[in-house]
Amino acid sequence: MTTPGFRPTHVVPQHGMPAWEAPDPARPTVPLDPLLPVRLEERRGDWGRVLCSNGWSAWVDARYLVAVPQDPPRSDAPLATAADPRPLLGRAERALARYRAAVEELADAGLDGESFRRRTRGLRIGVVVDGEDVWLYDPARERWLYGDGTRLSTYATDRAPDAAEDRGHTATRIVNPDRGAG
């Protein structure tokens, strides 16, 4: 159950992270799931107390939390093809239907465990709906997107930036204030 008015300030790193009952390494608790939205409530040095959407809180090494925009972006503009949530919702719906069909066939003894694993291998689905807000996982681009019903924007990503990608601009030069541009 989501805490009313919960707005995350960070997400857990892509590989999850350990958590503690108190800012004390001797008191571990259940680790946090990858890309879990959390709100940073308190800092004590490198320690941070985070609140999860279900009201549970824990202490983490706050240096590793990934910051997110304070307010997810919204738009009053008409749907644009790149930001339209419907294609991604359709892909998630089809992937879920494929998974459900495999589960039903497994439950009816029409599939053995290995056949079930082969049929579901590579399926990745992620959908969270909370009122007008939606978070969708795009497995083709390995990223989570946030949407408000009219458009989507990247929320968190699994992949590192592609250095080979041409971004259409000159690379930034580092300037040493003592020596000038170099």
Image (spheres, rainbow, N blue to C red):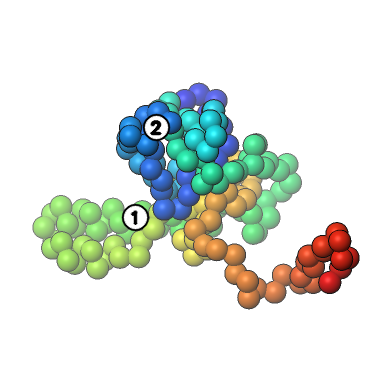
Does the image show residue 7? yes
Nearer to us: label 2 or label 1: 2
Tell me where residue 97 appears, x and y as whole percent: 34, 55
- Rounded to the nearest whole Å, what is the CA distance between mark 2 and mark 1? 45 Å
Tell me where residue 99 appears, x and y as whole percent: 30, 56
Tell me where residue 163 appears, x and y as whole percent: 63, 71
Mark 1 crowdedness (10 Å alpha carbons): few <14, some 14-19, many ≥20: few
Q: Where is 80 relative to 37, above or below?
A: below
- Which quadrant of the figure contains the N terminus? top left
Identify the secondary structure beneath mark 1: helix
Seen as rendered, the residue at the extreme top is: 4
Seen as rendered, the residue at the extreme front is: 178
Callout 1 amino acid: Ala
Residue drawn where x is 52% and y is 62% of the image: 159
Q: Give the number of the disc on residue 26.
A: none
Asked where in the image residue 114 lies, by quadrant, the reply is: bottom left
Tell me where residue 88 appears, x and y as whole percent: 51, 56
Of residue 15 and residue 126, the one placed in the foreground of this image is: 15
Asked where in the image residue 161 lies, by quadrant, the reply is: bottom right
Residue identified by numbered label 2: 24
Lower sequence index among marks 2 and 1: 2
Identify the secondary structure beneath mark 2: loop
Q: Position of 66 compared to 180: left or right?
A: left
Q: Position of 174 compared to 24: left or right?
A: right
Q: Position of 36 compared to 82: left or right?
A: left
Mark 2 crowdedness (10 Å alpha carbons): few <14, some 14-19, many ≥20: few
Residue identified by numbered label 1: 97
Q: Where is 2 relative to 172, above or below?
A: above
Residue drawn where x is 38% and y is 43% of the image: 18
